[in-house]
Amino acid sequence: MDGRLHDTIPSGFVPGRYGIDAYGNGGFRFADMSHRGSVLMLPSGIRAWHAADAGGIDLAGLRPVIAESERIELLLVGTGLDIVPLPESLRRRLKDSGIGLDVMQTGAAARTYNILLGENRKVAAALIAVA
């Protein structure tokens, strides 16, 4: 991605399902837009996400995921450059909502999300931006 990355998610939300065109430089490119910071890729659309690192992943930040649990079978969580396990209480809450979970590096999560989206799977992603 080029150095001209800007937060272009109007009101923090872009409706619709989009693949990730690029990631890095502190953000993501999708739907002919760029966004600086982390994102939630949901069936309803893309949301800006407050988590700046794996320690910032909490239930409050994942409430939009749980709210769409009827439309999500698998949540891919990109925890940055390193794989960081989520707390058991958060894992349990997602499981109780019927959402499977796979935690991996952000790059792997973005690529996996694109593949599963292309297969029209019920997938969502919570991706922490990487440099």
Image (cartoon, helix red, strand yellow):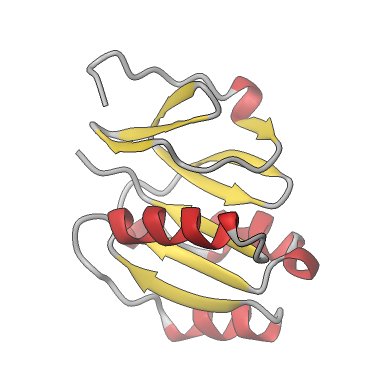
Residue 111: x %, y % from top left: 38, 55
Above or below, comparing residue 48 to residue 78 in the picture: above
Residue 107: x %, y % from top left: 29, 54
Point out the residue furthest to the front here.
Answer: 119
Above or below, comparing residue 40 to residue 109 in the picture: above
Quarter of the image for residue 6 reads top left
Point out the image quarter for the N terminus: top left
In the image shown, does 26 or 116 lie closer to the viewer? Answer: 116
**Which residue lies at the image location 58% right of the left edge and 72% below the top edge?**
74
Quarter of the image for residue 70 reads bottom right
Side (left or right) of 68 relative to 76: right
In the image shown, does 126 or 49 lie closer to the viewer? Answer: 126
Total numbered labels? 0
**Which residue lies at the image location 60% right of the left edge and 30% below the top edge?**
12
**Which residue lies at the image location 74% right of the left edge and 46% below the top edge?**
44
Point out the image quarter for the C terminus: top left
Point out the residue furthest to the top here.
Answer: 4
Residue 43: x %, y % from top left: 70, 52
Residue 35: x %, y % from top left: 43, 27
**Which residue lies at the image location 36% right of the left edge and 50% below the top edge?**
128
Above or below, comparing residue 46 to residue 53 in the picture: above
In the image shown, does 8 or 31 lie closer to the viewer? Answer: 31
